[in-house]
Amino acid sequence: MSVPVEQLDDLKFLGGIFQEIENAFNSTDYRETLEGFLPSLVSSHAGHFSGRRDSNGSIWPPLAAATIAKKGHDVPLVETNRLKESVLNLKHPDHVGEATHRGLLFGSDVEYGIFHQEGTKRIPQRAFVGLETPLLDEIVDGVADHAVENLKFKI
């Protein structure tokens, strides 16, 4: 099958098509596509907690002996389950999970979570929020597919 080809000698013949493409791209709303990834993010983060690891697969440092004695167990980031539940329960009051027209927020609003996520002088870093590369690739592909589909109808 042969595809007809035309050669343009001057871009002015394209008129405002580039502006139309830019306008269509800038007005694309990714909210619905991104919301579809929230369950996958929850599942991925459940794996972080159950595997005691960050999104890169690095195992969290073990608890200090004094902490284990105080808590009565050796499970990091689990004292009251508030932090864990704030990440894994989309309806938890401290959960941060929102798709916007241009982005996706996911994590926890628990005030002490940042100390575990980043670490401090006395608390080793145990990053509990982050994207694993395969899921990131899946999200990027989903957003790109959405953008292409949206541009098809606008141009």
Image (tube, rainbow, N blue to C red):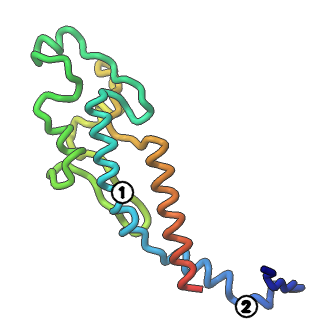
In front here: 85 or 114? 85
- Kindly identify which residue carries mark 1: 37
Amino acid beneath label 1: Phe
- The quarter in which the N terminus is drawn is bottom right
In front here: 4 or 45? 4
Amino acid beneath label 2: Gly
Q: In which quadrant of the rendered view does residue 29 lie?
A: bottom left
The local crowd at label 1, few if under 14, some if 14 to 19, many if 20 or more residues have their Cα within 10 Å, is: some
Q: Which mark is residue 15?
A: 2
Gap between marks 1 and 2 measured at Cα:
38 Å
Q: In which quadrant of the rendered view does residue 114 lie?
A: top left
Direction from residue 37 to residue 25 in the image, left or right: right
Residue at 31% of width from left, 28% of height from top?
51
Residue at 34% of width from left, 62% of height from top?
36
Decide: is 23 above or below 118: below
Percent x, y for residue 45?
31, 41
